[in-house]
Amino acid sequence: MTTEPSTIYLKDYQPYPFVLNQVELFFTLEDHCTEVQSILSFSRKAEFPKHALFLHGDEVTLRSIALNGKILASTEYQLSAEGLEISNVPDEFTLALTVQIDPKNNTQLMGLYKTGTAFCTQCEAHGFRRITFFPDRPDVMTRFTVTINADRKHYPYLLSNGNLLERKELPNGWHQVKWQDPSLKPCYLFALVAGDFDILEDRFITMSGRNVDLQLFVEKGYRDQGVWAMASLKRAMKWDEETFGREYDLDIFMTVAVFDFNFGAMENKGLNIFNAKYILAKSATATDRDYILIEEVVAHEYFHNWSGDRVTCRDWFQLTLKEGLTVFRDQSFTADMTSRAVKRIEDANVIRDNQFLQDAGPMAHPIQPQFYMEVNNFYTVTVYNKGAEVIRMVQTILGKKTFRKAMDLYFSRHDGQAVTTEDFIKCMEDASGIDLSQFRRWYVQAGTPVLEINDEFDIEDNEYHLHIKQSCAATADHSPKEPFMIPLAVGLLNRMGQDIPLQLKGESTVAENTKVLWVTAPEQTFTFINVTENPTPSLLRNFSAPVKVQYAYSAAQLSWLMVNDRDAFNRWDAGQELAKRILLGLADDVQQKRDLTLNPLLVKAFRTIIESEKDLSLAALNLTLPSESYLLQQMTIFDPDVVHQAREFARQQLAKELRDVWQKTYSELNDGKPYEYNTLRVGRRALKNLILSYLLKNEEPEWYRQAYEQFTQADNMTDTMGALIALNNFDCLERGAALAEFYDKWADDPLVVDKWLSLQASSFLPDTLTHVKALLNHPAYHAKNPNKIRALIGTFSTNFYLLHQLNGEGYRFLAEQVIIVDKINSMTAARLVAPLIQWQKFDAQRQQLMQAELKRILATPELSKDVYEVVSKALAV
């Protein structure tokens, strides 16, 4: 069994005892024996008169070390598994180090590694210590000068942060470049790339009139797939100037796309490195969803230039300071570029499907964690997406105009600094004059608040009362649970479906159609005046806070709200709540072996949406049933079998009952027009392909043929995948033929092949696991590539119906793959294990099966810290 790693606590934070004045790095790039020389100039901080110098190091081989020009003997420093320590150093000194590393065998993809024919780096969070010995912590900020030597033929492009100072030709066909970054930055933002690429070039003129050269480097043969990403970058740069007043500061902005990458992308100062999945796109290979995600991720990494690079984190407990804020910024950007209503629903769905589940599990943590074993495990939906919701609530409290003023203050006050979430909140307070002391609990308390709401209408006084109780269940991290400050946006609708102007008793403010109530106490009552009829409440409009609302709507009220609520999010949410109740009722019928009948209210509501909703992207969302993951979360004991059967029965009945309108609408939308990417066409394709999946649930040969026809005739990947997804759960000839043709056509495009792997792993067909196991030996699968692992194993791990079969084969397979992948890439392995850590939510038989596999993983020799932390916490529940 692996020795338990140490736990790091926020309360133990201490500043670094030295100032790192400047750094010079010299790289001589070789596959297995890259030499890295570093010259580090230090000054001791006065408050640390006797502290030793400690530099982090991981899998680097020390060749020489000199202090102020004097070579140190091995007795004058100490090497350990964590790094290098020198006990006696003067107050001012220069340290010169030479190390060797092996990029070719760096399968962890952290530090400097070889990807295909190129060298690449990933240094967040603790990757730089795998390059050389260094104070690898975000609060040590310095200026980097980087010299790179490499073979010119194989590596014509040698890139790093900042500005290019010089190029030189060297003997034997080698060459050298020197880069200098004028910005102060921590080492996690360091980047180096060397390779031979196709390059796209463009230019952006900033709001002050400066020219910025834009360069996008992609692997050979993919230049045509970088056009959309370049255009997205320019839109993001313009939007950030107009919305946040943020102008880019360097003369060049470079982006590189590679196929081997742990993350989606990395915001290294002036040299963003991307997983190719979030750069490469053309209509034949990328879906509409891919286009949207690429624009969002490109914007996210660019926005980090200010919210993450120029103002960065003091320590990793502050991760949401940059990630939550930047996710909020990229969500706002994407809402402006697409459909605001659809974007809000999608963002809320991430919280409800995934983050609420994390809050209820063994890895629950606040957006500012107070402790961790391995920081990689806190790159989570809580830190990122819930963190973004917290920023959104700050904007709600301050108002958009004051929020912008506060953001300007934050950027100006802390430019070039490594700061904390407390520094951010202080700027919000100073700019607004609002005390956010209670609001800070969102940063340090884990869990999902629940609002239990009751109401009453006083017909004599024309008053309407909302009684609200807030609570938050205990979480695995044992964080305190004091009342949150929760913005609850509400509306009241009259019987005609019109918003009633809202005014609280005792307030002189002008009446509003949507009122934000500030829920701050365990129990509160809000009284609205001049309400002349008993209204239907519209609660948590636009998902104004990441909370659960409990209110006793009748099924008829929910059906009515689906059509009449003025708030797009709440129209969708009413439909989800109605469908949830109906589906859980069906699940109970399955458990009790009763005959199944679909409530006609759902059929009627769906028909109304099809016939009346003008926003077709929104219609597609409204006609999508709640996910199995979300439905399971509503059960006291998770039962994936009955949830799956109930949901599939509902889809079959909706297919049958609405067959006429499905067929009519599909025919209208399947117009055969050439592909265009715009909001209208995206909505048409989304609805058309959803309808096709319903039509196939009738299990009629003519619709198998129609799906195959769409597959063969499609001029774009959205419709190609739409047809494949519709066929994917049917054991028909058309499915087999389409999958075979798809692979034959796209076998040489790794990102398209990922879609092929994911399709097969997501199928509900009974032989899916057998097929997934066979694909592990297919030429399309590469066990060292995170994208392939996520596409095949990661997708199967979220196939709840088959993963959780009572024979335990799904659990055994997943545990085996976690153990295998952990030896190659521990960060990826830790994410794969996530479905097993929810074992306590299931029945006794599944609990025993999952616990057995978790114990098997934990007993594996030399288990990584990443996986050890997740599994040990799960078993400790």
Image (cartoon, rainbow, N blue to C red):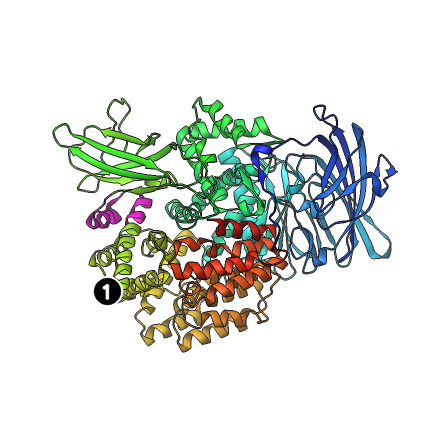
Q: Does the image show residue 514?
A: no
User: 605 left or right of 49?
Assistant: left
Q: Quadrant of residue 860?
A: bottom right
The quadrant of the image that shows the N terminus is: bottom right
Q: Position of residue 505 (x, y in %)?
A: 24, 25
Residue 367 location, x and y as percent? 49, 39
In the image, farthest residue toward the bottom = 733
Question: Which residue occupies 28% across, 30% down?
Answer: 524
Residue 367 visible in image: yes
User: In the displayed structure, would residue 672 be above or below residue 492?
Assistant: below
Given residues 866 and 227, the one toward you in this image is 866
Location of residue 301 with respect to 208 vertically, above or below: below
User: Number of callouts in the render?
Assistant: 1
- The residue positioned 21% from the left and 59% from the top of the image is 599
Identify residue for label 1.
596
Residue 519, horizontal then vertical, whole percent: 33, 31
User: Is 573 in the magenta?
Assistant: yes
- Packing grade of label 1 (10 A; few <14, some 14-19, many >=20) is some
Q: Quadrant of residue 410?
A: top right
Residue at screen point 16% across, 29% down: 462
Q: Is residue 667 above or below residue 393?
A: below
Relative depth, front residue between 271 and 728? 728
Queried whether the magenta region covers residue 289, the answer comes back as no
What SS does tag 1 mark? Answer: loop
* Residue furthest left in the image: 460
- The front one of 713 and 255 is 255
Name the amino acid type tagged 1.
Answer: Leu
Q: Main secondary structure of the magenta part?
A: helix
Which stretch appears magenta? Answer: 552-574
Q: Percent x, y for residue 83?
A: 72, 43
Please state which of residues 198 and 781 is positioned toward the viewer in this rendering: 781
